[in-house]
Image: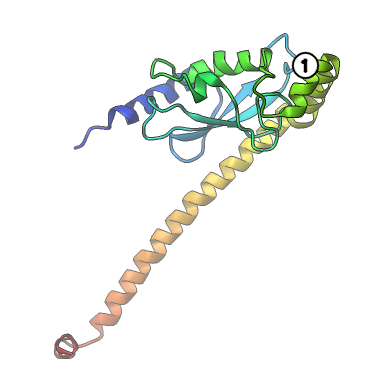
Amino acid sequence: MCSPSPGKRRIDTDVIKLLESNHQVTIMSGLNEFMVKFAGPRDTEYEGGIWNIRVDLSDRYPFKSPSIGFMNRIFHPNIDEMSGTVCLDVINQTWTPMYDLTNIFESFLPQLLAYPNPVDPLNGDAAALYLHKPDDYKKKVREYVQRFATADMADGLSATCDGQSSSEHQTNGLNSSNQTNKNESDDEILSDFSEDEAADMDLE
């Protein structure tokens, strides 16, 4: 029996650690693709908001950093409003295997929301407001929290992803069943021929 690769063992270990840290995790397609509920950090304009963060782990994890993205909208200079892509050096450039998934949700993301970097923005409008009209920036952040990051919205998105994942598993099972039935049907058709007829077909 083959033992799991070091990368697979590390994925298993880090996801379990994330679960044991009381983070709400929704498995989407195995332990390398899942969603984590992330609460806005205290004492920031994001406090009270709940975001679903999609996490994709490559086969080269932890040597390759996770791919993460916000699934519900957020107003922040370093997060693309529509795609949810995150611009964060510690993930995109300086990631090392010493980090794990809990670092992302307990340190890296809270710090990013508390201390944006408007010099290297993904959302130019948010960066401009943050630099030149901070009060308007805070107002816009709170507006987005109320519109897109309520607990009910996060729960609804989680339920939708759960349903899609279940549907995919059912579809895969149905396809497998259909293929099995097809193979059995083919065997039955061949069995209708006599041995002599089958031999003649082989000679042709």
- Image quadrant for the C terminus? bottom left
- Residue 196, given in percent of the width and then of the height, sits at 14, 90
Eyeballing the image, is 135 above or below 31? above
Considering the numbered disc 1 on the image, is that residue within a helix, a strand or a loop? helix
The furthest residue to the front? 119
In screen coordinates, is 3 left or right of 176?
Answer: left
The amino acid type, in three-letter code, at marker 1 is: Leu
| Residue at the spot 51% in from the left edge and 18% down from the top edge | 90
Q: Is residue 149 in sight in this rendering? A: no
Q: Residues within 10 Å of mark 1 (few under 14, many from 20)?
A: few
The furthest residue to the top? 43
Most foreground residue, 149 or 115:
115
**Residue 181 appears in which quarter of the rendering?**
bottom left
Most foreground residue, 115 or 58:
115
In screen coordinates, is 42 left or right of 91?
Answer: right
Most foreground residue, 186 or 132:
132
| Residue at the spot 53% in from the left edge and 45% down from the top edge | 165
- Residue 166, given in percent of the width and then of the height, sits at 52, 46
Eyeballing the image, is 46 above or below 53? above
- Residue 5, given in percent of the width and then of the height, sits at 28, 31
**Residue 183 appears in which quarter of the rendering?**
bottom left
- Residue 132, given in percent of the width and then of the height, sits at 82, 16
Q: Is residue 193 in sight in this rendering? A: yes
Please name the residue that numbered disc 1 is placed on. 131
| Residue at the spot 50% in from the left edge and 15% down from the top edge | 103
- Image quadrant for the N terminus? top left
In screen coordinates, is 136 left or right of 19?
Answer: right
Most foreground residue, 92 or 196:
92
Q: How many marks?
A: 1
